[in-house]
Image: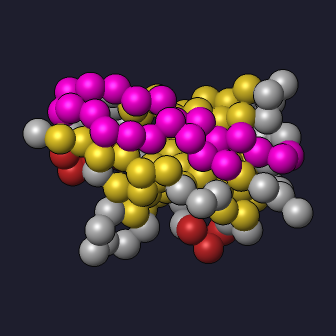
Amino acid sequence: QVQLVESGGGLVQAGGSLRLSCAASVSTYAMGWFRQAPGKEREFIAGISGSGGNTYYADSRKGRFTISRDNAKNTIYLQMNSLKPEDTAVYYCAADRLRVGVHGYEYGYWGQGTRVTVSS
């Protein structure tokens, strides 16, 4: 059973930064970050291969968000800078044994989410 636990969410002012963490019970799985804002569909933010050698970003998130991982700690991170009120959402990490996907259905394991609120 793969377990994923996100942390690091909270309230931040516009322009600020947050770093989300996702502690996994497995290492070297492909991982992704998604988010879901109220009333909106879940959307892909970024993904990282099992080795960490390849990263993928939704075009709209390039530049402000950075995904990384530390396989020694079985943890992936999402560094978020220059946050905007429209970044307010619940952020989820997801895992797949084989490959990074940009769609939620490509991941078999999900964390419970961590809430990020960006005030204007």
Q: Describe the colour scheme in one phrase.
A: secondary structure
Asked whether, in this view, residue 118 is left or right of residue 30, the answer is left
Determine which quarter of the picture holds residue 97. Answer: bottom right
Determine which quarter of the picture holds residue 101. Answer: bottom right
Report the magenta residues as a range: 5-26
Q: How many marks?
A: 0
Q: Is residue 11 above or below residue 91?
A: above
Residue occupying the far left of the picture: 120
Q: Please report the residue visible at 17 percent of the width from the left and 41 percent of the height from the top.
A: 119
The picture places residue 54, in percent across and down from the top left corner, at: 66, 35
Q: Is residue 15 above or below residue 110?
A: above
Quarter occupied by the C terminus: top left
Q: Please report the residue visible at 72 percent of the width from the left and 64 percent of the height from the top.
A: 109
Q: Please report the residue visible at 68 percent of the width from the left and 30 percent of the height from the top.
A: 69
The picture places residue 105, in percent across and down from the top left corner, at: 62, 73
Visible residue check, residue 101: no
Residue 25 is inside the magenta segment: yes
Visible residue check, residue 84: yes
Q: Please report the residue visible at 32 percent of the width from the left and 63 percent of the height from the top.
A: 37
Residue 89 is inside the magenta segment: no
**Could you say which is closer to the camera, residue 70 or residue 49?**
70
The picture places residue 77, in percent across and down from the top left corner, at: 58, 33
SS assignment for the magenta stretch, majority: strand
**Could you say which is closer to the camera, residue 5 or residue 57?**
5
**Could you say which is closer to the camera, residue 86 or residue 61?**
86
**Could you say which is closer to the camera, residue 69 or residue 111?**
111
Quarter occupied by the N terminus: bottom right
Residue occupying the far front of the picture: 11
The picture places residue 93, in percent across and down from the top left corner, at: 60, 52
Determine which quarter of the picture holds residue 96. Answer: bottom right
